[in-house]
Structure formats: C-alpha cells, structure tokens
C-alpha cells in the first residue's frame, strides 16, 4: 500500500511533459494500454481520466461529440487558411468586394463575355480563307485560346495561400514590371474593355433602330428616331443596369445575356440553313484583283477568327469573386465553369460559321450572317422571328456591357479608395458609371468608323489572349529550361506576338492602300 502511495506522489510531482500531437485511433482502442506500457503509466491513467472531463468523453458512446469537435477544429483550420487580399482596401472595390462566387457564376460570366456579336462575323472569314483553311484556323485558335485560358486560371493563385492576382494588370505588372506593363498590356486591356463597350453601343443602338423599323412596318407612319438617339437610349439603359454594385451581383445579368446570345446564334444559323443556299452561291475564296489585296483578305480573315475569341481580359476578375482555401482552391470551380461555358461557345461558333458560309458562300456581307439574314430573307421570314432575333441581340449587348465595363469601374473607384482610404459612396459610384457611359456614347457618335479599324485594334489586343499568358507562366512558374512546358510556352508566346505584328502591319498597309473613310459625328453612315 505504501508503494502505491509513493508511486502516486511521484506521478503528481513529476514535471509536465509536452503534449504529443493528436493521433487518430479507433474508439475501441482509446483506453486499451499499448504494448510495452510501464506499470507507472497504467496506475496513472485513472488519475488522468478523472482529472480531464474530455478524456472521460472519449468513449465509443461519445464518438458523435468527438466528431463534432473534430469538425469544428477542421473548419477553424480551413478558415485560417483562406487567402487574404494583398491590400485590405480591395474589399471596397467592385471586383473583390464580394467573394461568394461559385462554378455556376463562373460559367455565366465566361459564357456572357466569350460569345456575342463577333461570332456572327465568322462566315466572312470563311469567305476569305475557304472551307479547309478556315476550319483548320478556327479549330487551332479555339484550342490555343482555351490553353491560355487554363494558364490564366492557374496563375490567378500560383502559390496556395499566397497572393491572388484578381486583375489582369496586376499580373502583368508582377511579370513585366510597372513600366513595361503599361507599354505592353495597358492599351490592349483598356481597348478590350472600353473598346468593346463602344462597339456594343454601336451594335445595340443600331439593333434598336432596326427593331423599331420591324415593329413599325413599311411604310412607317411615325418619325423614327435617329441613330444618335438610339445610341442614347441604349446608353441610358446600360447605365441604369450598371448600378448593381459588384461583379458577383451581376451573375443573373450574365445568365440572361448568355442565354440571349446562345438563342440568337441558334436562331440565325437555323433560319439561314432552313431557307437554303442563296442563288449563284460559290464557296471559292473571293478572288482579289491583286496579290496585295489577296494577302490583305487572308489577314483580315485571320483577324476575324482571332477577334471571335475574347474574355481573357476579365477571366482573372471573374475568378477573383470566388473564395479560396488550401483544401478548396478557386481554380477548381473556376475551371469547371470555364469548361461548361466554352463547350457551349463551341456549339454556337461552329454552326454559325459553317452554316452561315454554307447558306451564303462568298455573298456573305462584310457585317456577317445577321446582315445576310436581313438582306436575303427579310421578305420571306416572319416579322416575329426577325423581331425576336433582334431583341435578343439588344439584350445580349446590354448585359455584356456590364461585365466588360466592370474592370473600368473598378479602376475608377480604386483611385478614390486609395487616395481617401475609405469606400466609395454610392452617389460617386453612380457618377463614375454614368460618366463612363457618356464617354463611350461620345466615342460611338464621334468615331463611327471604328469598325474599319477593328482588324488593327484586334491585332494590338491579340497578345492579351494568345501570347502574354504563356510568358506569364514561364516567369512565375519557372519551368526548367528545355522541358516540354518551357518549349511550348515560349513557342506559343513568340508565335502569338508574330501573328499580332503581322496583323498590325497588314492592316496598316491596307489602310494606306485603300484609304480610311473618316466621317466624324455621322454614325448613320456606318449602319
């Protein structure tokens, strides 16, 4: 008996030893003495069990409680690993204000930003390149841009738990430096945002004018509004819709726009194919009067195909709306949304391009399949079908305007937030968005000949889609020199820059040869 007391006093006077890391064991073995335990540990275990109530709970009957405690601990650990913003003030900006996005939101945004009016011009590229080369170029461009999109999705958070690049310019500045990022990336990125918004005003306003004529009939007793007035109506509607605060809040708007784009693309190519081929159709490439004109036509066709793929300048911003943890990184739901979106985009682009060229051949108008539908089938097609198609184009332009304008809104508010160190008030946020809409309206009215510069501007912005992501991957991920990843990315990056240079030189050459019809403040001439 005395020996037992001595053992107990020895245990109580012993220095506390550091607690070992928790080890997961089956409940049936929690109280089983391990092989090789000393009698001292066996005698001390009842004292420990009585002294610690939590040890008393560690029984098979208390396993639900233990699982709940483990679940709470796991949740706290996961929350502790959430990647934080590089600058806390970014939580006040439209792109990173809300991080509750998911794979569905990513699919909506990517589908809305990736398909639109530019897909309707693809049959024109087929008229310049012919069946074989046009399909080959379209397929290669689709695969190439999907690969660079995957690169950007993985570069959004290149190191788990570290910096998240929620803006394209942030990533470009990190890779190229502040000076070179402004030279190489600022103009193309701003053009892809503000320039597309201006093009949407022109297309959307012109479609409103066309819809009014379809609804009014011929002859129309009412005085139709001018093209400038229709631009103003479109801008007012776009600015009103832009009052939604952040990128996450327009997920429903993107869903409506994506649905409208898929619907009108499907309706247009279906009606065109159903009506059959137009008389005297030919599928041979249009013969140019000279070799120079032939080369320019080929470059124009390549530029149209490159212009059909857009959205890379907002993909990092879309991914920035998602939460990210070590166990659930943002690139997983983002890539799921991208795969769904671009599968649907492919199901729209190929039928529009192939079906449109089959129906109209080399008689396709320069403005694409929508103009061909009105030109050849306006009298033998129901006014209801034409009206619904035009309405869907307008809806898509209004909704796409929101996602492409969001980076500009974010940049405008960032100046105020970083200077004042406080959130932008609602009235100033509304003022910024109204000001941006007014500037785009003035550009659309003053420079209606921007469509003639589409090839040139498309060549300038092409590296954002096809070249820069490859260089960014090499600079940040640092693959070993000579490996397949290193070779592929350098080759694609150099090839993308070369194609961009050829398109710029070729379009400048074409403008010099043919001349540029400059008519300021006459948007009616561009319709």
Image (cartoon, grey):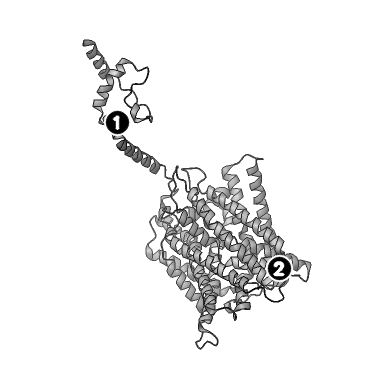
x and y, in percent, of residue 518 in the image:
64, 75
- Label whose residue precedes the other's in the sequence (1 or 2): 1
Residue at (59% x, 54% y) in the render: 146
Residue at (38% x, 44% y) in the render: 79
Q: Is residue 84 above or below residue 60?
A: below
Is 286 on the left or on the right of 442, as rendered? right
- Which residue has dot 2 on it? 510
Whether label 1 touches label 2, CB < 8 Å: no
Q: Is residue 64 visible?
A: yes
Q: Residue 199's quadrant in the figure?
A: bottom right
- Circle 1 residues within 10 Å: few <14, some 14–19, many ≥20: some
Residue at (66% x, 63% y) in the render: 303
Which residue is more in the foreground, 350 or 250? 350
- Tally the marks: 2
Considering every residue shown, the one lying at the far left of the view is: 1
Which residue is more in the foreground, 18 or 53? 53
- Which residue has dot 1 on it? 59
x and y, in percent, of residue 235 in the image:
48, 72
Considering every residue shown, the one lying at the far top of the view is: 2
Is 56 on the left or on the right of 527, as rendered? left
> Which quadrant of the figure contains the N terminus?
top left
x and y, in percent, of residue 270 in the image:
59, 69
Q: Is residue 398 above or below residue 16?
A: below
């Amino acid at each position: 008996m005395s020996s037992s007391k001595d053992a107990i006093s020895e245990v109580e006077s012993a220095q506390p030893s550091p607690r070992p890391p928790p080890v997961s064991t089956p409940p049936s073995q929690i109280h089983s003495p391990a092989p090789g335990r000393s009698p001292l540990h066996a005698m001390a275990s009842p004292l420990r069990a009585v002294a610690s109530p939590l040890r008393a709970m560690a029984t098979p009957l208390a396993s639900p409680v233990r699982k709940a405690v483990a679940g709470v601990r796991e949740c706290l650990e996961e929350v502790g690993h959430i990647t934080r913003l590089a600058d806390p003030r970014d939580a006040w900006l439209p792109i990173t204000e809300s991080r509750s996005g998911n794979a569905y939101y990513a699919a909506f945004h990517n589908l809305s930003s990736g398909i639109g009016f530019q897909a309707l011009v693809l049959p024109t590229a087929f008229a310049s390149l012919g069946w074989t080369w046009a399909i080959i170029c379209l397929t290669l461009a689709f695969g190439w841009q999907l690969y660079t999109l995957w690169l950007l999705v993985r570069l959004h958070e290149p190191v788990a738990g570290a910096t998240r690049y929620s803006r394209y310019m942030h990533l470009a500045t990190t890779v190229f430096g502040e000076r070179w990022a402004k030279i190489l990336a600022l103009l193309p990125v701003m053009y892809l945002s503000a320039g597309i918004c201006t093009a949407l005003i022109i297309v959307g306003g012109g479609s409103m004018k066309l819809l009014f004529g379809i609804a009014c009939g011929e002859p129309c007793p009412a005085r139709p509004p001018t093209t400038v007035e229709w631009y103003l109506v479109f801008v007012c509607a776009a600015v009103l819709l832009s009052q939604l605060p952040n990128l996450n809040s327009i997920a429903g708007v993107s869903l409506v726009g994506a649905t409208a784009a898929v619907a009108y693309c499907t309706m247009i190519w279906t009606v065109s194919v159903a009506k059959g081929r137009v008389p005297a159709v030919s599928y041979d490439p249009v013969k140019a009067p000279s070799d120079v004109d032939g080369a320019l036509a080929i470059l124009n066709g390549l530029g149209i195909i490159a212009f059909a793929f857009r959205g890379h300048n907002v993909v990092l911003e879309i991914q920035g709306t998602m939460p990210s943890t070590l166990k659930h990184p943002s690139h997983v739901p983002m890539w799921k949304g991208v795969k769904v979106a671009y599968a649907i985009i492919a199901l729209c682009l190929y039928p529009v391009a192939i079906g449109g060229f089959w129906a109209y051949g080399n008689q396709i108008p320069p403005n694409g399949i929508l103009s061909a539908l009105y030109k050849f089938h306006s009298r033998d097609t129901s006014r209801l079908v034409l009206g619904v198609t035009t309405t869907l184009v307008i809806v898509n332009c209004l909704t796409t305007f929101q996602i492409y304008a969001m980076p500009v809104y974010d940049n405008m508010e960032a100046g105020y937030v970083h200077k004042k160190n406080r959130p932008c008030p609602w009235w100033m946020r509304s003022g910024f968005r109204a000001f941006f809409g007014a500037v785009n309206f003035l550009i659309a009215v003053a420079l209606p000949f921007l469509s003639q510069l589409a090839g040139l501007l498309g060549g300038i912005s092409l590296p954002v889609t096809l070249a820069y992501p490859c260089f960014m991957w090499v600079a940040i991920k640092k693959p070993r020199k000579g490996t397949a990843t290193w070779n592929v990315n350098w080759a694609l990056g150099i090839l993308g820059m070369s194609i961009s240079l050829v398109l710029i030189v070729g379009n400048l050459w074409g403008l010099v040869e043919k001349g540029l019809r400059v008519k300021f403040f006459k948007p009616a001439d561009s319709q």
